[in-house]
Image (tube, rainbow, N blue to C red):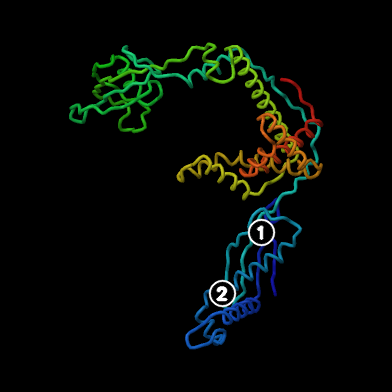
Amino acid sequence: MTITITPTETTGVSRRLQVAVAAEAVSAAEDKAARKYANKVRLPGFRQGKAPAAVVRKKFADAIRQEALETLVNDAFKQAVDGAEKLAAQPHVHDLKFAPGSDLTFELHYEVRPEPTLEKLEGFSLTRREASVTDELVTEQLDRLREQRATWTPVTEKALPGDMVTVLLSTAEADGTLPEGREYKLTLGGGQAIPGIEELIMEVAPGATAERPVKWPDDFPDESQRGVSKLTRVSVVDVKRRLLPDLDDAFARELGDFETVEALREAVRTDMGAHAQREAEAEVRAQLIEQVIEANPFEVPGAWVRQLIEGYAQMYQIPQEELARFADEFKPMATRQVQRDLIIDTIAERESLKASEADIDARIEQMATARNVDPGQVYAQLQKGGRLPEIERELTEERVFTWLLERNTVTAG
């Protein structure tokens, strides 16, 4: 087959090739596709495989040309990519010209998997912040636990910020008349109503009604309503206030196997300390990756970045109309994530740090011991949930970062 391939771009991970297939090769491919159709199709008045080639080519002209085109493009791609480079994504055909009796020409665009050399992996200076847990932080966490178990209790006094209210609300029409009020349930201070209306609500006791002009904010979303004063009537149906449970031994026992509130406090302190240490370690790893990338810059396939962005867009359920903005904002983070994964993969491969089956079994044993269950049960659950690769990746990352941190300086900050 006469195929001429001319590279037009070979920088970084991007590849662009100008491909030309001679007219006689195109004709030969069409003849081959026509014979294939002639052997398998049945036309009225002819036995299967006996229809004249000219009849077959006329009836299935578009399908024959399409099959010939696909064959030619695939053959050209196989010739162009000799296996020395690994594809990062499927190639794309651009600027295709496929006129009858003429050469077939097109551009082939694709990206290859990068092979970072990572020549500098030592000599970096990193800072690990102190993972301290103060009494104030523990108290704040305990207060959050109390808020999660708070109850809403009806009160007879005027509402305060944070209270939940049921109100009948009406605003004047264009002619100045006040329609019948509509019922709303609001948590004051939550931004569910404009400040002026919240202020009016807090002036009214349950069962009472008040009305006065209320000014709409200057930054109200509807520009036509900005700064407008409207006669507003509010009838407060009820007010409920959040009642927090006492921070005592009874509360501690409700949360778990804690006999006293002090035991609960120490458990919270331990959990927060472990979380703070994990965050501090994650920050050190992020610093290390940034310095590795800065010292060893390399390009990543745009297809990989786009795939990651699309995955996060689905996870966060980004609306269609916001996808473009989300992609622009998330692209730098997605690019760093791809670079991070490539660095870990490259070091794991080069230094033989990939987690083994024995490593995975040991981690599952630890998980089973912590849960006081059989390791086989944990393994089966992980396998069923498709999480074994996640465990392997986690262990590999731990080994890679341990290897890196042994070769760099970490100081307390």
Q: Position of residue 154 (x, y in %)?
A: 34, 16
190 sits left or right of 209 in the view: right
Label 2: few (<14), some (14–19) or many (≥20) C-alpha neighbours in 10 Å: many
Q: Secondary structure at mark 1?
A: strand
Residue positioned most to the front: 374
Q: Residue 280 lies in what quarter of the image?
A: top right
| In the rendered image, the vertical position of residue 322 relative to residue 31, given as above or below | above
Quarter that holds the N terminus: bottom right
| In the rendered image, the vertical position of residue 158 relative to residue 322, given as above or below | above
Q: Position of residue 69 (x, y in %)?
A: 60, 71
**Closer to us: 395 or 191:** 395
Callout 1 touching callout 2 (CB < 8 Å) = no
Q: Residue 102 lies in what quarter of the image?
A: bottom right
Q: Residue 296 lies in what quarter of the image?
A: top right
Residue matched to label 2: 65
Q: Residue at x 50, y 41 (%)?
A: 325
**Closer to us: 325 or 343:** 343
Number of numbered callouts drawn: 2
| In the rendered image, the vertical position of residue 201 relative to residue 180, given as above or below | above
Q: Position of residue 62 (x, y in %)?
A: 52, 74
Identify which amino acid the numbered label 1 is placed on. Answer: Arg
| In the rendered image, the vertical position of residue 243 relative to residue 103, given as above or below | above
**Closer to us: 75 or 96:** 75
Identify which amino acid the numbered label 2 is placed on. Answer: Arg
Disc number placed over residue 77 in the picture, else none: none
Label 1: few (<14), some (14–19) or many (≥20) C-alpha neighbours in 10 Å: many
Quarter that holds the C terminus: top right
**Closer to us: 127 or 228:** 127
Q: Residue at x 56, y 74 (%)?
A: 65
Residue matched to label 1: 16
